[in-house]
Image (cartoon, rainbow, N blue to C red):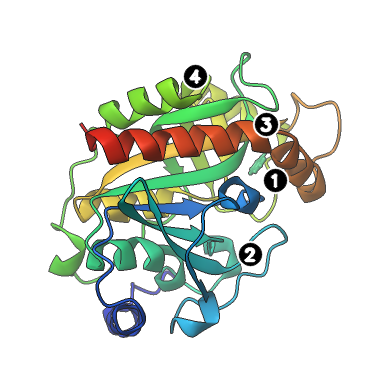
C-alpha cells in the first residue's frame, strides 16, 4: 500500500520551480504546519500557489494555505512552504516529502519543520512551544521504503541526531519553552487514551500526524533539521474534552505571536551566524 517516492515527479517539480525562480540560492527552508501561516505574514516576497508546482497540488485541511513564499531575512534567501501534505491523505509519499526535495534542489542546507501537537508530558500543556529533540515513527511506514534512490541519500541513513543539537539550542534561545520527543501517528483519527498511555511509556512527550516523514527524508539528504511544535491540546485521555481540529487551530492562533517571534529570531540567528 506504500507506493515508493516518484523521483520523476520530484524532478519535474524541481525543474518547474527552478524556471520560476532561477537564481534563488536558497539557504534555509521552512515547512509550516496547521494554522501557522500567520507566523510568516510579515515576510514579503514572491508567492507561488502550490498548484503551479507539479505534484504538490492543493492542501485540503483547514489552516493549510498551500503556497510557497520566496523571501529573504537579513540577506539570507528563505523558502517558506505554507501548508504540508500528509500521509493520511492517501496520495502516497511524493507530495508529503516534495517540499524537502525542492529545498535541497534549490541549494538549502537547513530546514525548519513546524507542526501542531498534543501534549503528553506533564509540563507540555496547550501553548507550549517545543524544540523537537528526537522522534518515534509510529506511522507504520517509512517514506524511504522501495527501491534505493541515491538522490535521497544512502540506503540505510543514520538517525542518531535527526534534529541538530545546535539548531535545538538556537530554538530555545529564540523562544521555545522546552525540548521533547515527538511521536508521529498516521492519523487521521486522534489517538485513544490507551494509545497515549502506551506512547508515554515509549518515551513520547508530544504527538502529531506529520513532520517525521519530512525529517526522515531531509536527514537522509543531508539537510540540517530543526523541528518546532506548538502544543495545541492535551493528548486524548489527559484532555477532559473530546479533541477537535478547530480547537487545535484556536490554540495555534492564540500562540501565534510567540510562534512568529520564535521563527523570526531563529531566522535572524541563522542569517547572522549560520547553522553552527
Ligand atoms: N494528536 C495528534 N495530532 C495532533 C494533536 C493530537 O492530540 N493535536 C494537534 N495535532
Does residue 269 lie above or below 1 as drawn?
Answer: above
Using the image, tell me which numbered label, if any, was put on residue 178.
Answer: 4
Badge 2 marks a residue whose secondary structure is loop
**Which residue corresponds to mark 1?**
190
Between the residue at mark 2 and the residue at mark 3, the CA separation in whole angstroms equals 33 Å
Between the residue at mark 3 and the residue at mark 4, the CA separation in whole angstroms equals 25 Å
Badge 4 marks a residue whose secondary structure is strand
Between the residue at mark 1 and the residue at mark 3, the CA separation in whole angstroms equals 12 Å
Q: Nearer the viewer, mark 2 or mark 3?
A: 2
Does residue 151 lie above or below 199 as drawn?
Answer: below
Badge 1 marks a residue whose secondary structure is loop
Q: Residue furthest front?
A: 74
Label 3–label 4 contact, CB within 8 A: no
**Which residue corresponds to mark 2?**
65
* Sequence-wise first label, 2 or 4: 2
**Which residue corresponds to mark 3?**
194
Between the residue at mark 4 and the residue at mark 1, the CA separation in whole angstroms equals 24 Å
Mark 1 vs ligand 1: CB under 8 Å?
Answer: yes
- The quadrant where ligand 1 appears is top right
Label 1–label 3 contact, CB within 8 A: no
Q: Locate residue 127 relative to residue 172 in the image: left or right.
A: right
Amino acid at each position: 500500500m506504500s507506493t515508493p517516492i516518484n523521483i520523476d515527479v520530484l524532478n519535474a517539480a524541481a525543474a518547474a520551480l527552478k524556471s520560476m525562480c532561477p537564481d534563488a540560492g536558497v539557504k534555509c527552508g521552512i515547512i509550516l504546519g496547521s494554522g501557522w501561516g500567520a507566523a510568516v505574514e510579515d515576510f514579503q516576497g514572491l508567492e507561488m500557489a502550490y498548484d503551479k508546482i507539479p505534484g504538490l497540488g492543493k492542501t485540503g485541511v483547514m489552516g493549510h494555505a498551500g503556497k510557497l513564499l520566496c523571501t529573504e531575512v537579513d540577506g539570507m534567501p528563505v523558502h517558506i512552504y505554507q501548508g504540508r501534505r500528509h500521509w493520511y491523505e492517501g496520495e502516497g509519499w511524493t507530495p508529503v516529502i516534495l517540499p524537502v526535495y525542492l529545498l535541497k534542489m534549490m541549494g538549502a542546507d537547513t530546514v525548519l519543520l513546524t507542526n501542531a501537537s498534543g501534549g503528553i508530558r506533564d509540563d507540555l500543556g496547550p501553548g507550549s512551544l517545543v524544540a523537537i529533540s528526537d522522534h518515534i515513527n509510529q506511522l507504520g511506514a517509512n517514506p524511504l521504503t522501495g527501491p534505493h534512490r541515491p538522490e535521497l541519500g544512502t540506503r540505510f541513513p543514520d538517525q542518531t541526531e535527526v534534529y541538530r543539537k545546535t539548531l535545538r539550542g538556537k530554538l530555545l534561545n529564540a523562544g521555545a519553552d522546552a525540548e521533547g520527543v515527538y511521536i508521529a501517528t498516521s492519523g487521521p483519527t486522534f489517538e485513544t487514551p490507551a494509545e497515549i498511555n502506551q506512547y508515554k511509556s515509549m518515551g513520547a512527550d508530544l504527538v502529531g500526524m506529520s513532520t517525521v516523514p519530512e525529517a526522515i527524508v531531509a536527514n537522509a539528504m543531508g539537510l540540517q533539521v530543526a523541528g518546532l511544535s506548538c502544543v495545541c491540546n492535551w493528548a486524548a485521555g489527559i484532555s477532559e474534552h473530546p479533541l477537535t481540529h478547530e480547537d487545535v487551530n484556536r490554540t495555534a492562533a492564540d500562540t501565534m505571536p510567540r510562534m512568529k517571534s520564535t521563527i523570526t529570531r531563529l531566522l535572524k540567528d541563522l542569517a547572522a551566524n549560520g547553522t553552527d
